[in-house]
Image (cartoon, rainbow, N blue to C red):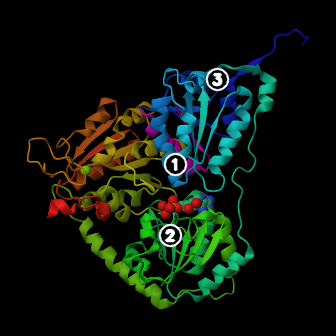
Amino acid sequence: AGEDAPQALTDGFHLLIDALKLNEINTIYNVPGIPITDLGRYAQAQGMRVISFRHEQHAGYAASVAGYLTKKPGVCMTVSAPGFMNGLTALANATTNCWPMILISGSSEREIVDLAQGDYEEMDQLAMARPFCKAAYRLTYAADIGIAVARAIRSAVSGRPGGVYLDIPGAMLGQTMDAIKGAQSLVKVIDPAPRQTPAPGAIARAIAVMKEAKRPLIVIGKGAAYDQSDDVVRELVEKSGYPFLPMSMAKGLLPDTHPQCAAAARSMALKDSDVVVMLGARINWLLSHGKGKQWGEPGGKKFIQIDINAEEMDSNVEIAAPLVGDVGSCARALIDAMENEGIAPPKEWLDQVHTKASVNMEKMASRLQNNSTPMDYHAALGVLKQVINEQPETILVNEGANTLDLARSIINVHKPRHRIDVGTWGVMGIGMGAAIAASIETGKRVLAVEGDSAFGFCGMEVETICRYNLPICVVVFNNNGIYRGDGENWGGGCDPATTSFVPDARYDMMMEAFGGVGAWVKTPDELRQAVNAALTSGKPTLVNAAIDPAAGKESGNIGNLNPQSVVAQA
Ligand code: ADP
Ligand code: MG
């Protein structure tokens, strides 16, 4: 070509899309609007999957769950100020759960925002985002997109994964540059989450603790599920012979039906164990901070902890043998070092765990058989347990209070990363975003078991489910309220109780309104039929399951976290 031939141009829109695609990020969870409407359209035009939601929080939850399931950052894209803030909740939740996610938000004119001159949706988003994520970056020049996206990806997935914010001023998207120079400016991230092996001394220290163990236990957390070293984890459990307890989202990493699973003897195992190996699980509120009654005699435990984040060690209790690294590498090193060390738990301990577990499982089994009308939680969950046993490839999403606590202990999970729930914060409203991401990322059937309150936070996304025709079956446990449906107005007025909803609400008709299948069921048989039909057809379905309004417990299993008024009780 001659010197004065017109140069091919690229621009911020296209560079951003090309940078994501170069790094094998092919899906965006999106809510369109100024200034990113066309960015979504161009992304779709360039072959990306763009899933547009009705509210940014759910697009964000979906992106975070995509990150959890794939080990690549899930991308959520939003408009400025209010849309950005809606997405920020999900970004903070991703960071709290240690899931990689990138929130890309459009923002208003920098020079107007910085002089506080009152721009359309004016907000200093970069400063706002910082406390809620691992890293926050702003792009001023299109020429920096390549390096900014690379930095965002590496920040999200390396070390302890988390949320990253990328601020995209609208004006930057329109900047043009020479197409060849643009392509050269892109960066493909090499080894974004390097494996990390602990030093031999740290392994020897752990082996010494294991050799002394009389009543050992392994606790497996969602960090281990995230790591995807499923075979190594199984080998560690089986070679050591230790009983194991899965945290809720680690259920299925080894099947809940595995002979070493101690889930049904959880309280006893935590209390009576003397050595506990933590595998990608934090000793936080979900484990009573490693202290108190639940953990037996003070000082009676030694902890070995495997975690990618060194600062996690000694966060709540002393860690006798810290192993800092990824679960796969640490578990591998432990297995190799265990050879010929005679590590095997005493038979009395294994018998004690088995006996307790069998007694508890029998008690539970009889409660699941009941045919009560209205259904209680156990009757309904007995049905769903059987459905998942028969179709173990189905991904289970679960939120609510009683609906969460009881489903967690009743429904067995058989495959790794096949249970997604409220996570570290116990947040309500993750259900539809999680279900959509699970379906999009895996192509599998999804069963979302939702309390009616939890569903209310994200219910509008059933339209998204119908629009993309996703094989998701939502079961709403409808007990007419929060915790219970039979609450009273403590002031005696005619307003409903603060925790009550419209009784017998027809959530099933919401799904029908958008072209999906709805079913209103009142018995275990009707529930079974409706869910099986949904999983067979793959059609978007909402099963509205009537649950006894008097069956629930205040705050489910965590009622102890409610502060009590001394004054009111006097
Ligand atoms: P759970 O809620 O299931 O107990 P947590 O979210 O509390 O799990 O803990 C997960 C832990 O796993 C976090 O401390 C995090 O740093 C760690 N983690 C995340 N990814 C990895 C990995 N690849 N290898 C090791 N540890 C990891
Ligand atoms: Mg309810």
Indicate yes or no whether the magenta region holds residue 30: no
Q: CA distance from mark 1 to mark 3?
A: 26 Å
Q: Is residue 77 left or right of residue 47?
A: left
Percent from the top left, x then y, of residue 178?
79, 20
Q: Amino acid at mark 2?
A: Asn
Q: Which residues are magenta?
A: 55-79
Quarter of the figure with residue 493: top left
Q: Which mark identifies residue 46?
A: none
Percent from the top left, x then y, of residue 304?
58, 76
| Residue 228 visible here | no
Q: Which mark identifies residue 316?
A: 2
Predominant SS of the magenta segment: helix
Q: Amino acid at mark 1?
A: Ala
Depth check: give the residue in front, 471 or 98: 98
Q: Amino acid at mark 3?
A: Leu
Which residue appears at 57% of the width and 86% of the height?
A: 344
